[in-house]
Image (cartoon, rainbow, N blue to C red):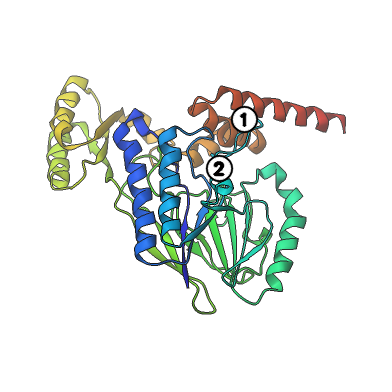
Amino acid sequence: MQFSHISDTHLGLVQYGSEERAQDVYDVFNQAIDTSIKDHVDFVIFAGDIFHVPNPNGTAIVQMANGLKRLKQNNIDSFFILGEHDISRIRTTPIPYVYHNLEFSKYIGQGKPIEYKGVLLAGFDKIRKTEIPQYEEKFAEVDKAAQNFSGHKILVLHQGITEFNKFAGELQSTDLPKNFTYYAMGHLHDTDVKKFNHLNGPIAYPGSIELTTSEGIKETKKGFFEVDISGQEANPNWIELDTRPQFSFKTDYQEISKTIDEISEKITSLSKKPIVEVNIQGENIETDHIQAQIARLNSIVLRCFWRISTKQVSDSSVFLDKPNIIDDEMFRLSVDALGSEQAANLAIKELLPVLSSGQIQEASQIIIENFEKFKKERKQ
């Protein structure tokens, strides 16, 4: 028996305002569905952030529906939980519930274990860091159910685990129920698998299926897991998706012409036009010369971004060594500036994502909720 573990699809993301990038996300999503069908998986798990925003456009909604429909047509059931991008702070029914109500897929995000084909499945929607203490009892309940179950037990979460990413971590591995044989994670966009002696199975992050804006431009692989549970242990097998290539280059201003030649030679034969970033360092820089050189790439790239950093600035810049996830660096800088992890968490992890997608009402609701919490704490 095997199942697909897919996460952070972010359907509806229109990166750089580019329709081609929106289509890229749909294309790799459909690749994951097609591969799961071709490989005859027994079921599919979607571990949150199905959509990029809680109120996705019609195309994104239809793309997800068509994917689930094709799975059903091939007798493959699917299960899902919600990530923070799926959950509206305004009281409304999350869009993915529609698929549950139409029996296209089954929602398992409320922590109630179900049995399916001899496998125990339990999931929790995204839990905010401030709410985590409230879930200790719920974790204990699902852990007891898993302990008393003889087959494979899968826990689906959309959380950051500190041992994987100290900046984005909301839970430690020791906080998790220990009796599950596979921890199907979402939220962190890099692929990673770790095993811990105090847990019965691996914690696995398939990562996002495409590079999102918060990850920056970099050369990386994206995909999902097909997990073999035929034996006593769960064995995740990495399936790479055919994503649009992205490259980041560094060069000195005096070498810009040579660098553009090298970039051109590297990307000319690619089947998909890549996204390219060029970081230029130097003094006495003429932007007209840079623009003329960058223009040489226009016909062979989808987008090309460039930026200048003088040597004086670069030597002291915290961005000299670019972090793998830009959000992590922003969070670290916010903690330094605000002097509080709690305030930085509100700014970077709660307000920034909704404001960047234009959700003013959502942001207002977050501020109101935090103000009410602040007043309550002051009274105690």
The picture quadrant where one finds residue 83 is top right
Secondary structure under badge 1?
helix
The picture quadrant where one finds residue 36 is bottom left
Rendered residue at 47%/73% (across/down): 1
Secondary structure under badge 2?
helix
Q: Amino acid at mark 1?
A: Leu
Please rate how many residues cluster around mark 1, counting C-alpha atoms within 10 Å: few if below 14, some from 14 to 19, many from 20. few
The answer to which of marks 1 and 2 sits earlier in the sequence is 2
Q: Tally the marks.
A: 2
Q: Amino acid at mark 2?
A: Val
Residue 162 pos. (x, y %): 58, 53
In 3D space, how far apart are the residues under numbered discs 1 and 2 (Cα atoms)? Answer: 40 Å
Residue 34 pos. (x, y %): 35, 57
Rendered residue at 61%/46% (across/down): 126
Residue 77 pos. (x, y %): 50, 60
Q: Nearer the viewer, residue 231 or 195?
A: 231
Q: Is residue 161 visible?
A: no
Q: Which mark is residue 338?
A: 1
Q: Quadrant of the C terminus?
A: top right
Q: Give the residue number, with chain letter if any, for mark 2.
A: 98
Rendered residue at 17%/31% (across/down): 298
